[in-house]
Amino acid sequence: MHAQRQGGSTTPETPAHPYRRVTSFRSRRAAITEAQQEVWERLWPELGMLAQPPAELDTADWFGRSAPLVLEIGCGTGTSTLAMAQAEPDIDVIAVEVYRRGLAQLLSAIDREGVANIRLIRGDGVDVLEHCVGPGTLTGVRIFFPDPWPKSRHHKRRLLQPQTVALIADRLRPGGVLHAATDHFGYAEQIAEVGDAEPLLRRADAGEALAISVDRPTTKYETKARHAGSAVTEFLWVRQP
Ligand SMILES: C[S@@+](CC[C@H](N)C(=O)[O-])C[C@H]1O[C@@H](n2cnc3c(N)ncnc32)[C@H](O)[C@@H]1O
């Protein structure tokens, strides 16, 4: 496979979706700074890919080692990605995001901090799950504050639907962890229902030793949500043998 590598200035703002499917993201245009552009041009060819299915990912080649692999879908500006990867240097992290400015911010932070265990994919995380990672290959999947799509006519756009959760469970290795968090009450109810209904997953026990750290920093998004009075619900499921 191939996940296609792509340079800076010609990059469209949101990658074209190769086939029709309801997606969990909106198209956003946002310029990146000159400094971010410089880092993007220098580092993206090595650390970044554009997900264009069908594609197979040789992670040992990409990271230059074999290590447990975590996929984070919708990393935003990468605050959690960076901190969690720094806290666990023996784990490799792939951050997936459609929003180029978020990836550019993360890439600049990786450059500034000299972090070696993060790679980036620009595109739809569902495509990455479907085409880029095989069954039983992931030690963790992180989904922090997925877009809530609060209007009921938009609920079909929510990322955590039964099919996506089944796909995540299939891609996790036994003992692998699905870690999700949301500040939206209605979405929290849906996530709980869908995750608990997935036969390959069980809730983690309180205090259970898990395959990855679940200690995450507070992002700007979360701070705003808390200031607005929203409670945050955290979910931890473990892939059954
Ligand atoms: C509300 S933001 C949260 C960002 C970050 N996780 C945080 O906690 O600050 C949700 C992010 O998910 C991204 N996103 C939504 N659906 C996605 C998908 N299917 N694949 C990749 N990224 C997605 C959006 O572009 C957006 O940046």
Image (cartoon, helix red, strand yellow):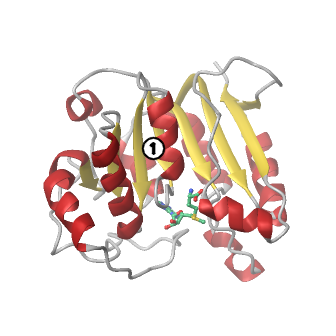
Give the image location of residue 148, x and y in percent. 69, 68
Give the image location of residue 71, x and y in percent. 47, 41
Q: Would residue 210 be seen by someone viewing this image from the given angle?
A: yes
Residue at 50% x, 40% y: name it: 83
Give the image location of residue 70, x and y in percent. 47, 35
Q: Quadrant of residue 202?
A: top right
Give the image location of residue 239, x and y in percent. 64, 28
Residue at 51% x, 57% y: name it: 74
Residue 207, placed above or below residue 103: above
Left or right of 41 on screen, residue 55: right
Left or right of 193 on screen, residue 3: left
Residue 40, placed above or below residue 84: below
Look at label 1 and name its amino acid. Leu
Q: Secondary structure at mark 1?
A: helix
Residue at 46% x, 60% y: name it: 77
Residue 165, placed above or below residue 29: above
Q: Quadrant of residue 188?
A: bottom right
Residue at the disc numbered 1? 82
Residue 99, placed above or below residue 176: below
